Image: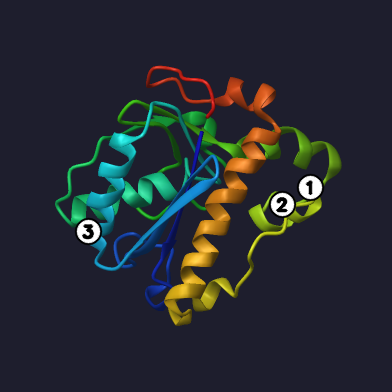
Amino acid sequence: MYGLDIETDTAAGGLDPRSAAIVAVAVSGDGWHDVLDGDETEILRELDQRLATLSNGVIVTWNGARFDLPFIADRARLRNVDLGLTLSADDRYRSSREPLPGHDGGYRAAWHGHDHLDAYNVYRADVGASLGIPCGLKSLARFLGFDPVEVDRETIHQLSTEALHEYVASDAIVTRELALHRWPTAVRATDRLAPVSPPR
């Protein structure tokens, strides 16, 4: 199982892939994490290559069905970078929440031989609904005893390289841990576009 998180250019608003670049990506596994930053084209190429070399598993995101993955796909198109990412529109991810600009809702996904799990949807469906608590990554992680790194989301573009790395890595690591925490339930919510592998 691999946690995945992106950070986008908050100097350009951060939420619209038509204008905001990806400034960092983190991938986490069992006892390791990688952070990619710098030139966006290189980030995208290196991310795709890194995922292609990992043993088939499940890529875990937090709201990645509606944000991270379509954002990555849009930026890759703008940068003319070919990815092994497949997105399939899914009506389950239509909601009253504002979708990513240029999109109607969310997606099921696969990347190379990896399936995808949006852990946010797992927690929102039961823990959030039954306990009436917000399902933001940081608030839920704290509620469950994790200690995520927190910064002002509006000023990510002002972070030092070290602070940016720490922040994006924390999000990828915590996302993976939250999915592992609920794996017996979460596995049923995993997108089935790629061969299924057990969590690692």
| Marked residue nearer the N-terminal end (3 or 1) | 3
In this view, which residue lies farthest toward the top?
195
Residue 176 found in image quarter: top right
From mark 3 to mark 1, how far is it between C-alphas?
35 Å
State left or right for residue 145 relative to residue 189. Answer: right
From mark 2 to mark 1, how far is it between C-alphas?
5 Å
Q: Is residue 97 visible?
A: no
Give the crowd class for mark 1: few <14, some 14-19, many >=20 residues within 10 Å. Answer: few
Q: Residue at x 80, y 52 (%)?
A: 143
Is 118 above or below relative to 41? above
From the top left corner, tell me how far across and down residue 172 is, in percent: 53, 51
Residue behind mark 3 = 42
From mark 2 to mark 3, how far is it between C-alphas?
31 Å
Residue 49 found in image quarter: top left
The local secondary structure at tag 3 comes to helix
Q: Could you say which is closer to the camera, residue 48 or residue 105?
A: 48
State left or right for residue 48 relative to residue 15. Answer: left
Residue behind mark 2 = 141
Q: Residue at x 85, y 42 (%)?
A: 131
- Whether residues under marks 2 and 3 lie with C-beta atoms below 8 angstroms apart, the answer is no
The three-letter amino acid code for the residue at tag 3 is Glu
Give the crowd class for mark 3: few <14, some 14-19, many >=20 residues within 10 Å. Answer: some
- Whether residues under marks 3 and 1 lie with C-beta atoms below 8 angstroms apart, the answer is no
| Marked residue nearer the N-terminal end (2 or 3) | 3
The three-letter amino acid code for the residue at tag 2 is Ala
Q: Residue at x 22, y 58 (%)?
A: 42
Residue behind mark 1 = 144
State left or right for residue 109 relative to residue 92. Answer: left
From the top left corner, tell me how far across and down residue 63 is, in percent: 54, 46
The three-letter amino acid code for the residue at tag 1 is Leu
- Give the numbered dot on residue 7: none
